[in-house]
Image (tube, helix red, strand yellow):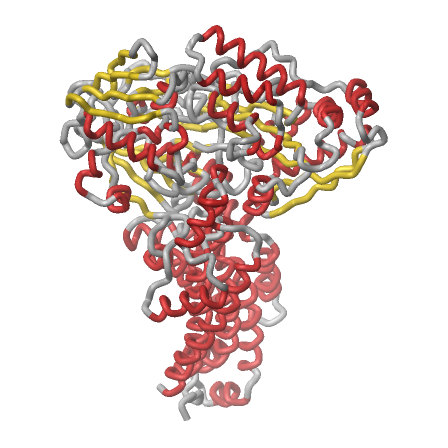
Amino acid sequence: MTFVAQRLLMLVPVAIGVTIVVFFLIHLIPGDPARTILGIHATPQRIALLRKQWGLNRPLVSQYLLFMDRLAHGNLGQSLFYGTPARPLIIGRLPPTLWLIVYAAVLAIAISVPLATIAATRKDALRDHVVRVVPMLGLGMPPFWVGILLIYALALRVHAFPVSGYGTGFFGHLRSMFLPALTVAIALSPVVIRALRASMLNVLGAEYITTARSKGVPARRLFLRHVLRNAVIPAVTVLGINIGYLIGGTVIIENIFAIPGIGQLMINSIFRRDFPVVQGVTLVFGVLVVVVNLLADLSYAALDPRVRFDR
Amino acid sequence: MKKALVSAGALIVLAGCSSGGKSGGTTGATTGPVHGGNLVIARTADSQSMNATTVFDNESIWVFEQIYQPLYTVTNNGKGVKPWLATGYKVSPDKKTYTFTLRPGVKFSNGKPMTSADVKFSIDQTRKAAKGWGYIDSAIKSVSDPTPSTVVIHLKYPWAPLLADLSLFANGIVPNNYGGKTETQFYQHPIGTGPFKWDYWHKGSALKLVRNPYYWQKGKPYLNSVTWTYVASDNTRELQLKGGQAQIDEFPAWSTVSSLKATSGVNMHLFNSTRTDYLLFNEKRKPFQDVHVRRAISLAINRGALVKAVLFGNGQPANSFMPPQVPYYQKATAGLQYNLAQAKAEMAKSSVPHGFSTTLLIPSGTSDASTIATIMQSELKPLGIKVTIKQLDPNTAFLDAQQQKYDMTLSYWTMDIPDPDELVTFAVDPNAGSKSFFTSYNNPTVVKDAHLAEQTLSTSKRQALYNYIQAHAAADAFMAFLYYSPYAYAASSKVHGFFVTPLGNYHMENVWLSK
């Protein structure tokens, strides 16, 4: 538990670091939200008035401290574009992104484990070569292309899934998010398959496996309890890191599949110079990355009893 | 709706003119309208706000036009108005007092009747909207409500565009005192007299309106609901249309128009619009004060090539800064069309006969702007003009144009009202907030005539004034008028009655879905 608490506490400096970097970077970008919102009818007087209303005329450090003060009270400020509080706007967009990430991770595991097993158990056989080569196509093809192919094949021709969108209700989400999650999983799987296959081969060559075999442990049990459990740890690391990258890259998938997630909110808010929303979303991204890594670390302990972080 | 933009960039706007394809809207099928159905419009951007008095983005306007209605509305050809929540008016002999009679039996979507107090409150709110559309009602001195069914508008001076101004969405009618709510509360769940009423808005995702049971046009609307979904990708909107997830695809890419025309189950509409695209010259920078330089560039641009390359042929070259769908547009204005020999002759007469180096500011990430810029770069070479394309992110490019931090840039205009006054003042008056469309163009005679036309009620005299303005603006080449383009909408063949006016407005009460 100490380990978990420590990792959770680490969220605080990470989040503060993220806010500092984002806050000052976004203010370096040219463009004035007051002028953007007022558009062509902007006059210097109106711009000055709006800047004052939004506190944009204050020194940057003062604006940052105000932001942090609000943050401490759970207030992410007002969206400059919508004129509504930023927090519900961000929270409302979080579930689709979380659905995408979790669903993609589950599908990636569902694809990777059997394929890696097939490859590792017959090293250098034809099926090993096939498993090593074919999934690489998924890595080589850009996700937007894979997404479009899946839509054509499974939504427009077979009508098995909706073309895009988030759906309503649990089963609606499950159905609507299948294609986007599969698109992500196809990109994730090759790396996980390779990592898992390599570690399985290592484990299969280990002495304790030979010992277990000589003691007559049934093949199925040997594989599930000894090989897979030990081999999966490096693959979890790879998956965790890739999901970390994925969190920042959800915008492409969200764009193709019209998923109203925070990736899309982020991009739109940057174009609108909607500072409070950009800051809030970045903060959420930072926290998500840390949480995913934390979960990956915790899974080590669950998978390998020898790993005890709190000792 | 919109206004000048630095090309099609972050702020999506529209308009233009010209036509093609199945223009004229979807008509009724042989069976006639049927009630029911939920229509989904997949659109390119989210709405910003439902406050009609302050927002300028089309994606908000096209939604709240289904909720709030003005006293007059724009005719289908975009050149006139017809009675809407008013049934008619009388004008005083000095042309400064208009007395409007309100349509009887009009109710808000909460069931309460609309009265003159609501109208007075609504127009007064718009007049007060200093950050929004208040300027459009600047000729109004006061509004009074002598009887529940009569509204009187007192003007500061005779004002020709009054009815056109009143037809603007910003002058739509809302309940007096926002029905007892604050302004902020009201616009979160707005109420109006329109065919649809508020259901929900999941910001960044979907906005849904449902039928108003108290709507004053008996039997309408036909649809149970209309949902606008935000689908940023052109490709995804098209796929949603083909897959039946959406029934209308707002603005398919020009490159897909011909294939959509050939797609079974899809009607590709190109509605006449008022969108006009321009190349702006900043007269605060050398050598663009020189009319010969501006004329030379204008003459060197092959507009037909731009229409082919950018619009895939779905448009027409522009001859005036006013588009054909605007009243008082003058077709006979020759404009400066492509003529390389004349362009070279103009350059020879200019202060830079051997050419010069300059920049063309465009927003990044927009393929249309990049295409135009690349073509122009090549077309201006024979004049000795070396153009460097300066790409900035759309927001910054837009702001730099407004602050006149550019040599040349791209922009466009769409009409808000069926009268040229708004565009003409914006484009040629250096003392207006727009500084002559951010060019600093200043022709005192043109400016004088523009303001004279505002207070001239005779149609023939106004036509003469606008003819003069268009001819001189073209000769001065204060902008190069590039092309007029239509509004492109792809719709399922099950959609009937969908029609977009040249101002971009549509009336969803006329739309129905066949089985």
On the image, the x and y values in percent for residue A111 come to 47, 62
Could you tell me which quadrant the N terminus of chain B lies in? top left
- Residue A219 seen in the current view: no
B58 or B437: nearer the eye? B437
- Residue B358 seen in the current view: yes
Q: As displayed, is residue B8 above or below residue B330?
A: below
Residue at 54% in and 53% down: A143
Report whether B457 appears left or right of A136.
left
- For this orientation, the residue located farthest to the top is B460
- For this orientation, the residue located farthest to the bottom is A311
B450 or B400: nearer the eye? B450
On the image, the x and y values in percent for residue B440 come to 61, 32
On the image, the x and y values in percent for residue A227 come to 48, 79
Report whether A265 appears left or right of B383.
left
Classify residue B511 by image quadrant.
Answer: top left
B85 or B111: nearer the eye? B85
Residue at 33% in and 39% down: B51
On the image, the x and y values in percent for residue A19 come to 47, 68
Report whether B213 appears left or right of A256.
left
B153 or B17: nearer the eye? B153
Residue at 46% in and 61% down: A58
Could you tell me which quadrant the C terminus of chain B lies in? top left
